[in-house]
C-alpha cells in the first residue's frame, strides 16, 4: 500500500476513486479539493457529458473514503450541485464530516439562465475533526477566472482554487482530488509547492490532466 501511494504522488491515477482510495493508507493526505459530478445529467453545448452525473450511488462511498484518507483535524472543499444540496449534505454527514463553511465563486457572466441568471459556482468547506483556523482565512466570496472549459465540460480555473490551497495547506502538504477532471486542482497545488494526488474515472480526462502536468514545470524548492 505504501509503495502504491508513493507511485500515485504528483500524478493522476485512472480509475474509480472509491476503489483507488480504498488502497491508500488511512490519514495520509492533508487537504482535499474536488469537483464531483453534480447529479444533474449535465451536458454542454457541444454534447460533452460527465461520467456518473446521472446517479448518486457513488456519492456516500466516495466521501467515506475521502474522510478515511484525510488526516485528523483536516479540511475538504467540495463543489456541489445547488439543486441536490440535500443529497450532498446527507452523504457528507454520513461520511463523518462537519459543515464549517460555504464558498461562492462570483462570475462575471451567466453560465445559464432560467428563473434566474446563474452567475456563481459554490462549494462547501467540510471538516474532519476540529482543524485549526488558518492564519489568513480566505474570503467566502472568490472571483471566478473563466477557463473557457476547453479541457473539460466543467473545468475549474486554477487561479480561483489557489487561495483555498494556500490558506488550508503549507508547502509540502499533500492535496487530493478524487474527481480531478482536467487537473486544475493538481496544477494549482504544484504551482504552490504542494504535493498532490489526482484520480479520475474517465480515460480521456486522465490523459488530459497527465499531459497538462507534463507541460507544467515542477516546483521543487518548497517541497519537502
Image (spheres, rainbow, N blue to C red):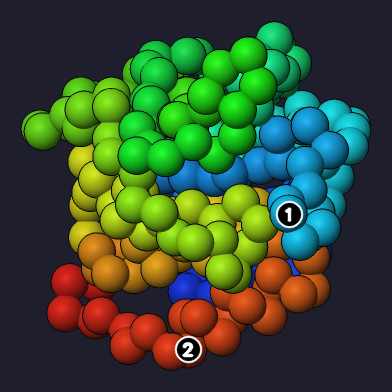
Instruction: Identify whether 196 is placed above or below 162.
Output: below
Q: Quadrant of the C terminus?
A: bottom left
169 with respect to 111 (left or right): left
**Residue shown at 77% from the left, 42% from the top:** 42
* Quadrant location of the N terminus in the rendered image: bottom right
The picture quadrant where one finds residue 93 is: top right
Can you give x and y, in whole percent of width and height, for residue 66 in the image?
Answer: 61, 39
Q: Is 105 located above or below residue 47 in the figure?
A: above
Closer to us: 185 or 159: 159
Give the class, few, some or many, for how many residues have Cα within 10 Å of label 1's Cα (few <14, many ≥20): few
Front residue of 221/77: it is: 77
Residue 9 in view (yes/no):
yes
Q: Residue 152's spot in the image, x, y percent?
A: 63, 63
Mark sitting on residue 45? 1
Residue at horizontal 70%, vertical 10%? 86
Image-quadrant location for residue 88: top right
In this rendering, would 160 be left or right of 24?
left
Q: Position of residue 67 (x, y in %)?
A: 59, 33
How crowded is the residue under tag 2: few (<14 C-alpha within 10 Å), some, or many (20+)?
A: few
Q: Secondary structure at mark 2?
A: helix
Reading the image, the residue beneath label 2 is: 214
- Residue 151 relative to residue 168: left or right: right
CB under 8 Å between callouts 2 and 1?
A: no
Element marked by disc 1: loop
Q: Earlier in the sequence, mark 2 or mark 1?
A: 1
| Residue 115, above or below 111 | above
Please provide percent x and percent y for residue 181.
Answer: 63, 60
Amino acid at each position: 500500500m505504501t509503495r502504491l501511494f508513493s507511485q500515485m504522488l504528483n500524478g493522476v491515477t485512472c480509475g474509480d476513486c472509491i476503489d483507488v482510495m480504498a488502497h491508500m493508507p488511512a490519514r495520509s493526505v492533508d487537504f482535499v479539493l474536488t469537483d464531483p459530478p453534480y447529479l444533474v445529467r449535465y451536458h454542454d453545448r457541444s454534447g460533452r457529458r460527465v461520467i456518473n452525473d446521472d446517479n448518486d450511488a457513488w456519492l456516500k462511498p466516495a466521501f467515506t473514503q475521502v474522510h478515511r484518507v484525510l488526516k485528523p483535524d483536516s479540511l475538504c472543499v467540495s463543489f456541489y450541485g445547488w439543486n441536490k444540496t440535500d443529497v450532498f449534505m446527507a452523504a457528507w454527514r454520513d461520511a463523518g464530516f462537519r459543515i464549517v463553511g460555504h464558498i461562492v465563486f462570483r462570475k462575471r457572466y451567466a453560465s445559464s439562465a432560467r428563473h434566474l441568471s446563474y452567475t456563481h459556482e459554490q462549494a462547501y468547506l467540510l471538516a474532519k475533526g476540529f482543524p485549526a483556523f488558518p492564519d489568513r482565512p480566505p474570503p467566502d466570496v472568490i472571483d471566478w477566472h473563466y477557463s473557457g472549459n476547453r479541457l473539460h465540460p466543467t473545468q475549474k480555473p486554477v487561479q480561483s482554487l489557489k487561495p483555498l490551497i494556500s490558506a488550508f495547506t503549507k508547502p509540502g502538504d499533500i492535496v487530493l482530488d478524487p474527481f480531478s477532471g482536467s487537473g486544475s486542482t493538481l496544477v494549482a497545488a504544484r504551482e504552490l509547492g504542494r504535493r498532490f494526488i489526482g484520480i479520475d474515472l474517465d480515460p480521456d480526462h486522465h490523459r488530459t490532466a497527465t499531459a497538462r502536468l507534463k507541460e507544467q514545470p515542477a516546483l521543487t524548492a518548497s517541497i519537502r
